[in-house]
Image (tube, coloured by chain):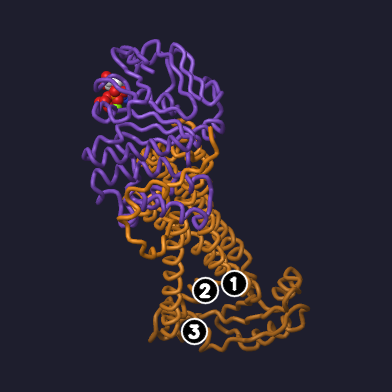
Chain colours: A purple, B orange
Amino acid sequence: MVRFENVGLRYGMGPEVLRDISFSIEPQSFQFLTGPSGAGKTTLLRLILLSLRPTRGLINLFGHDVAGIEKDTLTALRRRMGVVFQDFRLLEHLTTYENVALPLRVQGREEASYRAEVVELLRWVGLGERMHVLPPVLSGGEKQRAAIARALIAQPQLLLADEPTGNVDPSLARRLLRLFVELNKTGTAIVIATHDIALMEQFDAARRLVLGEGRLYVYD
Amino acid sequence: MTDTRFDPQASSDWATAEPEAPQPALGGSQPLVPAASIAGRALVTVIAIMTFLAALTAGAAQLVAEASSGWRSSVAREVTIQIRPSPGRDIEADLAKAAALAKAAPGVADIRVYTKAESERLLEPWLGTGLNFDELPVPRVVILRLEAGNRPDFAALRKALTETVRGATLDDHRIWIDRLGVMANTLVVLGIGVTILVLAATGLAVVFATSGAMSGNREIVEVLHFVGASDDYIAREFQRHFLQLGLKGGLIGGICAIVFFLGAGALSSSFVATPGGSQIEALFGTVALGIGGFVAIGAIVAVVAGVTAVVSRVTVRRTLREIG
Ligand SMILES: Nc1ncnc2c1ncn2[C@@H]1O[C@H](COP(=O)(O)OP(=O)(O)OP(=O)(O)O)[C@@H](O)[C@H]1O
Ligand SMILES: [Mg+2]
């Protein structure tokens, strides 16, 4: 569903952050994206999300070549992906509930049609009691779970998570990982960017994509 | 890819810990663009002031137009014959002759000969009271009230008058009516011009406010894009936001203007009871804004809201193209 061929990227006139990246992500696959801080994990995820365009090379998403992609197609592609940002990016003036419901709301759906679904997911990630509060009063871990819930709510085919366990204690990290594994079993392809080695060791079956010095090494 | 729906309940770690209490009503309709912001309040204030000024100008123009047309029609319905007294002249007899001539002319509905005392009173505003008018050759006047829509032949009447009564003049106020008309029209055109300028300035203020809000809310636009919102959807959200601000500002400004005119009207009608007030009313008409004026203010509010909506729509679309 995602295919990179000799992709290179530089920010402005800077050095190439990513060089000759070639890999693909299969439907229903589970992979960790890892590498030292500053290696380009977030950058790679942004390329998949189409929030960055490659300076060279070819990216194919769900069968669409991203070069010269139409805006409508872009919106449709983004609806097939869910994303958890490293810095969460919750909208501060909306409640937890409204934040999580956002992907459904922007599809033009009536609130009544998704309310139960959102409430159920919020309870499931342990935010049932916090659904009416605004993000600034949530703890780091709660924000993390809200961001994850927002990425899951529209049942995407591909989930991209940037350091989804960066702000939580090891036991919560384990539970979140179990959540991702569960989601993967129902058919969602998952990419988790992390440098948490302990986390990766808990799920040995996963592929590892390792970034180092601008290059990508794949361990199946 | 399987079609299995992701069912959170299937393997919940948290669900059991959560009490299944009934949920309070969820109001999921909080606008996506933050409603209250400093920039938003400033824009409402600017739009309110602009609307107030535009409504004031339009109302004033309306008042001038109404007053001048009232003045013109009442002045045009009256014509005066003036006869200057001179030594050895029987002014009363000459007045009677002139009055008879005028009465016979077609198109004259009614005449009234001002008595000597009445004629002197006409001069009081200019010369003051307590003057001995016996020493002054105060001109005497006959007022002719004309039939509506039937103007007499002034040239013939004037000729007959000068032949019969020495030194009698006929004044149909034509010059005054024309001048007044030109002046009033100038003021009205000026008023319309100022109103248009104010509306244009409002439009520009909205351009700045919209692009300011778009860059201030860039983070929101980005997140909306990532969760799968189309440009159309985002643009609609921002437009709704700015239409609301425009309507709010417009209504505040319009209501202030209406209150202003109602207050001025009440004040002026309380003035009419005084001698000075009746003179002002005779000159300018009442300050009471008619239905037309209120309709004009309503139209300005609607135009301001419309301008806000259209201008913000264009700006939002342009900014989205730039971001995308
Ligand atoms: N917007 C940007 N402009 C210029 N340089 C950038 C930008 N974003 C990232 N970089 C640079 O690109 C490199 C890769 O950054 P990136 O955020 O992808 O790393 P990362 O692997 O996600 O790191 P971390 O583990 O700390 O999150 C870094 O050297 C960073 O300084
Ligand atoms: Mg990163």
- Residue type of the residue flagged with mark 2: Gly
Q: Quadrant of residue B41?
A: bottom left
- Dot 1 and dot 3 within a common chain: yes
Which of the pair B246/A74 is nearer the observer? A74
Give percent across and percent down for residue A108: 53, 48
Distance between mark 1 and mark 3 Cα atoms: 27 Å
- Residue type of the residue flagged with mark 3: Glu
Residue at image location 41% in from the left, 53% down from the top:
A120
Q: Which mark is residue B70?
A: 1
Query: Which of the two discs, 1 and 3, labels the residue nearer the N terminus?
Result: 1
Q: Quadrant of residue B274?
A: bottom left
Q: Which mark is residue B285?
A: 2
Front tag of 1 and 3: 1
In the rendered structure, the residue with mark 2 lies on which chain? Answer: B
- Dot 3 and dot 2 within a common chain: yes
Distance between mark 3 and mark 2 Cα atoms: 25 Å
Give percent across and percent down for residue B96: 67, 87
Q: Is the C-beta separation of discs 2 and 1 under 8 Å?
A: yes
- Residue type of the residue flagged with mark 1: Gly
Which of the pair A202/A88 is nearer the observer? A202
Name the residue that disc number 3 marks. B120
